[in-house]
Image (cartoon, helix red, strand yellow):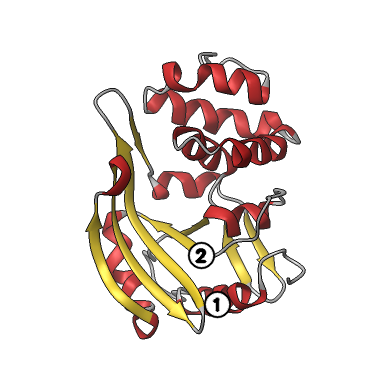
Amino acid sequence: MSGSGIPYALEIALCSIVEELEFYGLGNPPVWLLGGSCGLLLHGARLAAPPRDIDIYCDLEDTWRLHQSLLRYAVSPPEEDFSGSCYSLRSLYFMGEAKAELVGGFRMGSSDLHYSVDVGMLQQYAPVRNFEGIGLVRLMPAVHELIFNLLRGRDERCHAIADLIKQDLDTHLPLLYQLIQGNHLEDHLQTNLEALLGIPASIQI
């Protein structure tokens, strides 16, 4: 393990990704956020198991430009993925033994549930930090990770994320309610949010 808590091979791979995805001098650079377990560890969440891969999120329109920058590591190009009631444009990369995925335009839904990830909007709320041995990284906001894991039924991870959010609840609440209300998820999340954070999902702010 490294000081970040990320396994060393993944940390080295993440450093390479950060270097490849720096678009110096470009007026309209593609936006990406580090999500999943690596992102949560860099947020400071306490997870039960170490990360097994790297999850990079972007919007559909940025997927191919980011893919081109990672092309020398590519195992598969961006391809439509419809697994688990979800949709994304997904591509796979290997840096040595470390696996990374680029996930473009992620959304999940069923007849009564819809949740879309707008990376361009989320970047306004994304912590930007310079991590030793990795570089400058924008982290997927923790409240997205909480909603995503609640919708996927990952209870253990939800508790870890909730503990992180409760350390500075007022900072996280505006985006939390924006995502819940913008995706009409009140009925799906209210009870769980009351239990995890002690707040009703239907509060208007």
Q: Is residue 100 above or below residue 96?
A: above
Under mark 1, the amino acid is Ala
Mark 1 nearby-residue class (10 Å; few <14, some 14–19, many ≥20): many
Q: Which residue has dot 2 on it?
A: 54
From the viewer's side, name the closer residue of 51 and 147: 51
Q: Is residue 188 above or below residue 130?
A: above
Q: Which residue has dot 1 on it?
A: 13
Give the residue displayed 68% in from the left and 50% down from the top: 47
Q: Position of residue 14 (x, y in %)?
A: 56, 73
Q: Position of residue 48 (x, y in %)?
A: 68, 50
Give the residue displayed 29% in from the left and 40% down from the top: 85
Q: Position of residue 141 (x, y in %)?
A: 56, 45
First in sequence: mark 2 vs mark 1: 1
Element assignment for label 1: helix
Residue 53 visible to the viewer: yes
User: Within the image, what quadrant is residue 166 found in?
Assistant: top right
Give the residue displayed 61% in from the left and 78% down from the top: 9
- The N terminus: image quadrant: bottom right
- The C terminus: image quadrant: top right
**With 204 as the anchor, is 165 left or right in this view?**
right
Under mark 2, the amino acid is Ile
Q: Is residue 156 above or below residue 43?
A: above
From the viewer's side, name the closer residue of 189 and 204: 189
User: Within the image, what quadrant is residue 81 found in?
Assistant: bottom left
Q: How many numbered discs?
A: 2
Q: Position of residue 129 (x, y in %)?
A: 66, 61
User: Within the image, what quadrant is residue 174 found in?
Assistant: top right
> Marks 2 and 1, how far apart in space?
9 Å
Element assignment for label 2: strand
Q: Is residue 177 above or below residue 155?
A: above
- Whether tag 2 and tag 1 are in contact, CB under 8 A, the answer is yes
